[in-house]
Image (tube, helix red, strand yellow):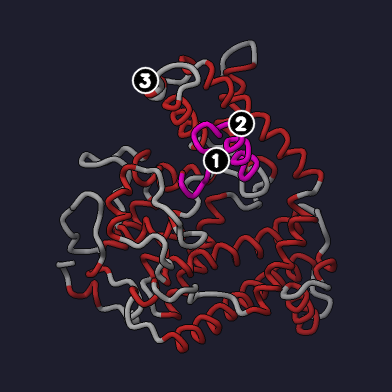
Amino acid sequence: MQGNSRLRDVKRAAYACHPEASVGRLVAEPDSPFRTPFQRDRDRILHSMAFRRLEYKTQVFTNFEGDHFRTRLTHSLEVAQITRTLARVLEVDEDLAEAVALAHDLGHSPFGHAGEAALDAELQTIGGFDHNLQALRVVTALERRYAAFDGLNLTGETLEGVLKHNGPVAAPPPLPALRDLARRLDLAAQAPLEAQIAALADDIAYCAHDLDDGLRAGLFALDELAPLPVAGTALAEVDAAHPQLEPPRRQHETIRRVIDAMVTDVVAETRARLAATAPRSVADVRRAGRPLAAFAPAMAEGVDALRAFLRERMYRHYKVNRMTLKARGIVRELVQTLLAAPDCLPDGWRELADGPQTRRTAETVRDYIAGMTDRYALDEHDRLFRLGPQRR
């Protein structure tokens, strides 16, 4: 990367991704004199329409169930904040790590995992639905704003981070725009440390904040966390330091200590793995054979225990189950109807379909519905199934 040398005056370890050594973009562009390639990636994601739509996409509770529950947008911002902290402490590229964190949920459908499950079940003829692959579709094709290319034309490192959010992949994704990237990067290798950090920050954020939202919703009580690792320790620390603390402050102090404990553990374990492996380049990180950013075994067990608690007491709570049932029904009916009657797709989408029940139509319906917010999906369902004056 050419341009202002001050853009390189950031402390990065040898094992970090360095913007001046980026593998580049799918479509070549001139460098910016003010921003590194990874800063431009982050900014393009922030300015994208798909990112704005996350404000009205479900995390666990639909956004109309309460003003203070997390949405996909606030979750993504919280993941980015934790990611920035980890990246700075571990001396990797903070901008790249943040870009991956902000992009990781761009492919989520309306109604969270309930919507994703319905799309996956109804679209098996085209391989189902996966929100990580959909995020790549968004940033390589579905955002149509720039004159010279479809998508956001992000760097290969940011695309790699999104693709490897759950670890290395066995085969290139079925996306034409990424064929060239697959040749430049070893997709079966470990992700760079920046992407590994973003994935861990996602785990930290959703565990801690789903606990917070579950408490706010009254699905369980704070004292029920006492037997759990991590959360129970945090609660005991709060009670010892602040006896008789009022409930809202007691809850917040517990959740912030849960986050701090997880972040501290990741820093310590990652530093230990870096010391043992001694990577001298990002290539060494990719070839390490295991993630170099990780929870220590004891903390990993604690995180698993928190997930099990949330799965039983929150994700399978009857109130959440009712929302899930309704959400799956709405998405299922939208998919089935539009597959059978693609002439009911709105302008801009109808032209992409080529007849009932075809593969091309299924791909179009997938992209159309996956991009919906919760409230748009509800409105579209009404427009298709409710008799009476049309909602616009």
Q: Are marks 2 and 1 in contact (CB under 8 Å)?
A: yes
Point out the stretch of residues depicted in magenta. 111-133
Whether residue 123 is in magenta: the answer is: yes
Q: CA distance from mark 1 to mark 3?
A: 22 Å
Vertical comparison of 35 with 231: above or below: above
Whether residue 342 is in magenta: the answer is: no
Residue nearer the viewer, 330 or 24: 24
Left/right placement of residue 383 relative to residue 35 reads: right
Residue lying at the far top of the rendered structure: 388
> Where, quadrant-wise, is the N terminus in this rendering?
bottom left
Residue lying at the far front of the rendered structure: 170
Left/right placement of residue 284 relative to residue 332 reads: left
Q: Are marks 3 and 2 in contact (CB under 8 Å)?
A: no
* Position in image of residue 73 (x %, y %): 52, 51
Residue nearer the viewer, 208 or 158: 158
Label number found at residue 109: 1
Disc 2: which residue: 331
User: For mark 3, does the 10 Å Cα neighbourhood hold few (<14), some (14 to 19), or many (20 or more) residues?
Assistant: few
Say which element carries label 2: helix
Residue nearer the viewer, 94 or 109: 109
Q: Earlier in the sequence, mark 3 or mark 2?
A: 2
Q: Amino acid at mark 1?
A: Ser
Say which element carries label 3: helix
Vertical comparison of 78 with 94: above or below: above
Q: Are marks 1 and 3 in contact (CB under 8 Å)?
A: no
* Position in image of residue 307 (x %, y %): 71, 62
Per the picture, the main secondary structure of the magenta-coloured stretch is helix
User: For mark 2, does the 10 Å Cα neighbourhood hold few (<14), some (14 to 19), or many (20 or more) residues?
Assistant: many
Disc 3: which residue: 351
Q: Earlier in the sequence, mark 1 or mark 3?
A: 1
Left/right placement of residue 335 relative to residue 17 reads: right
